[in-house]
Image: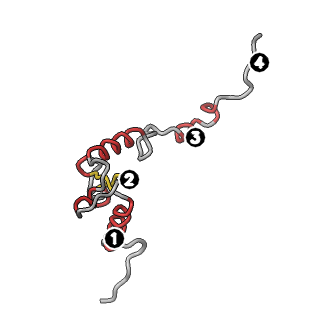
Amino acid sequence: MPGFPSRHKPLQQIAPVHVAQAQPENYGQGRGGRPWRRKRDAIMKRDQYLCVPCRAAGRVTAAEEVDHIVPQAEGGTGADDNLQAICVDCHIAKTKAEAARGANRSHPRRGRPRETEF
């Protein structure tokens, strides 16, 4: 028994712009995507699932995260040789230090420049 024809238009006809925005081309490429998970797993395996900064300090701590050695904001890349396995405590301390460096960097002022008297 045939069904009734649909009385609704496909979403692509109603809002093609929204459909394009909802499904970007780089879907799954971020930190939650499959390529990142594979890279993260490879870095953790390479570093034997141990925190690299802790090992350098003579401690043995299980790593739970992967972090950029040189932050991308400071010119680092996403290459494997710029990634390291790191524990949560070391990651928090490293992130605080990076944030402090970022706050101390000179940034161009926003808005109107100050008028100076000569």
Mark 4 and mark 1 in contact? Answer it, CB < 8 Å: no
Q: Nearer the viewer, residue 18 or 2?
A: 2
Disc number placed over residue 33 in the picture, else none: none
Q: Position of residue 72 (x, y in %)?
A: 31, 56
Q: Position of residue 86 (x, y in %)?
A: 33, 56
Distance from the alpha carbon under mark 4 to that under mark 1 = 63 Å
Q: Secondary structure at mark 1?
A: loop
Image quarter in which the C terminus is found = bottom left
Task: Identify which residue is drawn at 64% across, 29% down.
Answer: 10
Disc number placed over residue 107 in the picture, else none: 1
Disc number placed over residue 64 in the picture, else none: 2
Q: Quadrant of residue 61?
A: bottom left
Distance from the alpha carbon under mark 3 to that under mark 1 = 36 Å
Marked residue nearer the N-terminal end (3 or 2) = 3
Q: Give the residue type at disc 4.
A: Phe
Q: Give the residue type at disc 3.
A: His
Mark 4 and mark 3 in contact? Answer it, CB < 8 Å: no
Mark 3 and mark 1 in contact? Answer it, CB < 8 Å: no
Q: Give the residue type at disc 1.
A: His
What colour scheme does the image use? secondary structure
State how many labels appear: 4
Q: Nearer the viewer, residue 17 or 51?
A: 51
Disc number placed over residue 18 in the picture, else none: 3
Q: Position of residue 106 (x, y in %)?
A: 31, 72
Disc number placed over residue 4 in the picture, else none: 4
Distance from the alpha carbon under mark 4 to that under mark 2 = 54 Å
